Amino acid sequence: MSKAFRVGVAGVGAIGRNHARVMAELAAASDGAIEFAAIFDSDQARAQELAATFNTRAVSDLAAFVDYVDAATVAVPTVAHRQIGGVLLDHGKHVLVEKPIADTLDEAQWLVNKAHDCGLILQVGHIERFNPVMRQLEERMNSPRFIEAHRLSPFPNRSMDIGVVLDVMIHDIEIILHLVKSPLVDVDAVGIPVLTHREDIANARLKFENGCVANITASRVSPEKLRKIRVFQSECYLSLDYQEQSGWIYRRDGMKIVREEVTVEKDEPLKLELAAFVECARQGTRPMVSGREGTEALRLALQITEQIERNNAAGKR
């Protein structure tokens, strides 16, 4: 009988506890091929609570954690991604790090280089790439000309170390870079702090070398929750709802526009994401969102954030 592949979760706060739930489900459904081996968190009481819930062990020492796992997800605050991810990679462990990949481009590139040098999998948690609606975008939209994305939610009381661009908008940034596949030539961004000292609502207009334009709005101070994208190309456009996992395609039929419902096979994106990570780690195959894609999304998110900060500083003079 082959040895079970051991997985763990580092950081079991608001996001990490869902990682723990899914890892326990994956292990239970694997017929012994996967073992949910350990949870690591600096808050020992929280780690023990989650470990008891999901029938695994709680570890408060990172050095001990690495001995229990072959691969782990990292859901600690962004500022600790390089530290925690680096220790895991140094000890030969495959890593999925939540988005954004790191706090700075230097730290992101360090993680990418470390994973490459060690021959390990580094996946970045851009969960919307695993949303079932993405298949519709990838199959139907081969030459997007205009993209409009809205991602709104009430204030989450988490991720307050970063603004809404790095917290929320980065999902759509990564998707748009994936769809457009053309160099960026211009960025125009605005953002406003409302409940924190960083931007809580932001808009960015991106122009690409191939002529495509993307308009992205993100807010974490909205009374409603909304995650939608519309992608326009010649003679048709696709309107998709990430939250409802539903959508419509609009086509030209003579001088009329006809609407057809898009069939989406619904599933939980986090489950699909973590299952893909475990499979990549076990087989040594390239993840859908590698460290390179995560770094490029971070690069653009930081460019947008810096422009917002410059504009806000100029407005105070």
Image: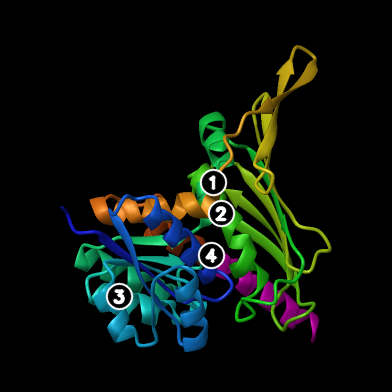
Where does residue 269 sit, x and y in percent of width and height? 53, 50
As measured in the structure, the alpha-carbon distance from the residue carrying label 4 to the one carrying label 1 is 39 Å
Q: State left or right for residue 44 relative to residue 172.
A: left
**Which of these two is toward me, 139 or 192?**
139
Mark 2: give few (<14), some (14-19) or many (20+) Cα within 10 Å.
Answer: few
Q: Residue 185 carries which label?
A: 2
Mark 4 or 3: in front is 4
Q: Which of marks 2 and 4 is nearer the N terminus?
A: 4
Give the quadrant of residue 81. Answer: bottom left
Q: Mark 1 points at which residue?
A: 209
Please indicate whether residue 73 sits to the left or right of residue 209 in the image: left
User: Which quadrant of the view contains residue 201?
Assistant: bottom right
Q: Which mark is residue 88?
A: 3
Which mark, by number, is residue 18? 4
| Residue 303 belongs to the span the image colors magenta | yes
**Callouts 2 and 1 close, C-beta under 8 Å:** yes
